[in-house]
Image: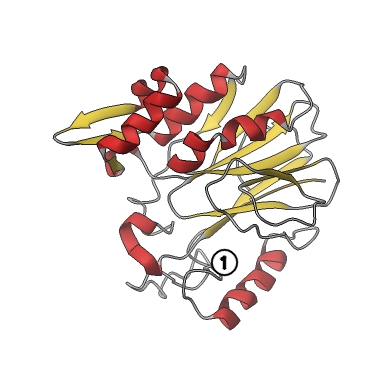
Amino acid sequence: MMVSNFPDNVKLVTTTRFFDENNRSCLIESGYDNFNLALHVGDNAVQVNNNRELLVDKYHLPAKPKFLQQTHSDICLEASSVQCLGDAVVTREKGVVCCVMTADCLPIFASNKSGTQVGVAHAGWQGIVNGIIESFVAKFDGQELLVHFGPAISQANFAVGQEVYDEFIAKDKSLAQAFIAVNDKYKLDIYQAARIILKGLGVNSITGGDQCTFAQKDKYFSYRRDGNQSGRMAHLIWLE
């Protein structure tokens, strides 16, 4: 379980590259390793489905999570929805597991202060520009919102082009604070960009944001580091 500022009845998990953290002998250069949870990245489907079954037992999940079809959209779903196309999910139901997957993008966990509503969002740079954070926050009930950032790529390892910078500035000029110009590129602090947007929405209780999926190869998948054969971590939250 992760350490956060959430109520005690809120449980959240981020998986790693390894099913067994004490046995990392499986580390390989392909990027999949032994606990990839994504079916859309070219990994062996039988192994991935087996990993999804192991996920439930390993973390004592109260139910199987519903895996979304993520498209860097602004769509936030209720966990009870029959739809799967979206980039964030929320619930008020106990024992229902909300889930997104990432491999550099920012997972944003959220809970209201009373611990009666939770959710998680997949916020890559495209999703941030498209408004996923705003859609996610809007799904909550107006109580004080608590947020925890799961692992994402750090600014030091996240170079983007002028076009990405321009899209952020067109969205909100204050997002310029999340960039550092380096030669003909910009280094994007995706954590800082999310903080700026969240604080603009009145969310001030934010923890996490100190990990780097790219640099921490012994722990996390990273699309920018491993390429098309990168696996995906799952980020899970539920109410007990």
Residue name at image x 40 percent, y 23 percent: 175
Q: Residues within 10 Å of mark 1 (few under 14, many from 20)?
A: many
Relative vertical location of residue 115 with respect to residue 93 in this rendering, above or below:
above
Residue position for label 1: 37
Its colouring scheme is secondary structure
| Horizontal and vertical percent position of residue 118 | 74, 38
Q: Quick check: 85 left or right of 193?
A: right
Picture quadrant where residue 210 is located: top left
| Horizontal and vertical percent position of residue 13 | 63, 50
| Horizontal and vertical percent position of residue 50 | 63, 77
In this rendering, does residue 5 appear at all? no
Residue name at image x 74 percent, y 32 percent: 7
Residue name at image x 58 percent, y 75 percent: 48
Q: Nearer the viewer, residue 57 or 131?
A: 131
Relative vertical location of residue 31 with respect to residue 169 in this rendering, above or below:
below
Q: Nearer the viewer, residue 56 or 109?
A: 109
Q: Quick check: 202 left or right of 187?
A: right
Residue name at image x 45 percent, y 55 percent: 103
Relative vertical location of residue 27 with respect to residue 224 in this rendering, above or below:
below
| Horizontal and vertical percent position of residue 87 | 61, 47
Residue extending furthest toward the left: 183
Q: In what element is the residue under mark 1?
A: loop
| Residue type of the residue flagged with mark 1 | Leu
